[in-house]
Amino acid sequence: MSYMVREALAALRRAPLLAGLSAAMVALALLVVGLFTVVSFNLHEALSRLEERVEVIAYVRDDARLTEVISLEDALLDMDEVRDVRFISKEEALAIARQDLPDFHDIFTGLEVNPLPASIEVELHPGSRDPQSVARVAGVAGLYPFVEDVVYGDDWVDRLFLLRRAGVVTTLILGTVFGAVAALIIATAIRIAIFARREEIQIMRLVGATNGFIRRPFLLEGFLTGLFGGMLALLLTFAAYRTGSRMIFPLEWIPGQWVLAGVLLGGVFGTVASAFAIRRYLQEV
């Protein structure tokens, strides 16, 4: 173990420019991944906030009896998708309209008859706001004859979850592509380092060193190169995030565990790329 660490650090000291350029190339590749991650995370958070507003509203006829309303509330609460229900009377609906629509306050104040219907607002569980679940709850509410109309914005809900699925697929595809680019950059840098030390490797082979013994310092070197590149990419990504938050619109920073995973991902890429590079070289000599 001490030999592996000593040789890996010595290799970095012998060629600091090459190591720095390798780490910089890795950082640029991972920077694209980091920026895309920040954008994807903020898109996910924005869609989540919109998803929290997904609810089912059942408008009740004026002649509906209280017992009928209670029976509908109980039926809805028995559904797995429903978190809570709330009955909004005609008077409460008018008061809410006056508060939420101040520009029309005079109009609502001068009314002799309250035109707004009573309603039942249905709040759904976070995992039950997909189009199928929302439509199922709306269908149950619509079965009651005293329910005049059921509104849940079906087209809007479909578009919301279409955007979410598109975001997930795009993240996976572009993340994989940019990850592969980072791995290729690290592999190229390691192959250059291997070529520069080819005579040393040949001597080690002549004195009986195994492939595993030769391979281990290069694996650690690749890990350190990728790790340094990941740290540099983190700094560049954070700088871009702060700049975007100031100049465009406020953004949210990615969670801490994502940051740690991203830095470690650079080390993993470096290790894997080094493994392929040194394995290929040892097979050729």
Image (tube, rainbow, N blue to C red):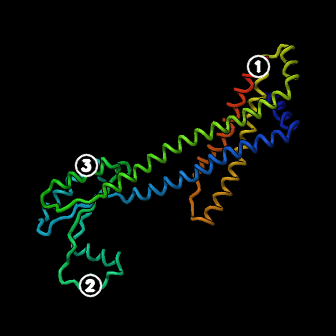
Q: Given the image, on which type of amino acid does mark 1 rest?
A: Leu
For the N terminus, the image quarter is: top right
Q: CA–CA distance between discs 2 and 3?
A: 37 Å
Decide which of tag 2 and tag 1 comes sooner along the chain: 2
Compared to residue 38, the image places residue 266 above or below, namely above
Decide which of tag 1 and tag 3 comes sooner along the chain: 3
Q: CA–CA distance between discs 1 and 3?
A: 62 Å
User: Is 112 on the left-hand or right-hand side of 213?
Assistant: left
Q: Given the image, on which type of amino acid does mark 2 rest?
A: Thr
Compared to residue 275, the image places residue 227 above or below, namely below
**Residue indicated by mark 3:** 136
**Spot occupied by residue 99 in the image (x, y as percentages of width and height):** 34, 77
Mark 1 neighbour density, 10 Å: few (under 14) some (14–19) many (20 or more): some
> For numbered disc 2, what is the local secondary structure?
helix
**Spot occupied by residue 116 in the image (x, y as percentages of width and height):** 22, 73
- Asked if labels 3 and 1 touch by Cβ distance under 8 angstroms, the answer is no
Q: Quadrant of residue 89?
A: bottom left
Q: Residue at horizontal 44%, vertical 51%? A: 163
Foreground disc of the pair 2, 1: 1
Q: Quadrant of residue 6?
A: top right
**Residue indicated by mark 1:** 282
Q: Quadrant of residue 85?
A: bottom left
**Residue indicated by mark 2:** 109
Decide which of tag 2 and tag 3 comes sooner along the chain: 2
Mark 3 neighbour density, 10 Å: few (under 14) some (14–19) many (20 or more): few
**Spot occupied by residue 202 in the image (x, y as percentages of width and height):** 85, 18
> For numbered disc 1, what is the local secondary structure?
helix
> For numbered disc 3, what is the local secondary structure?
helix
**Nearer-the-camera pick, 47 or 13:** 47
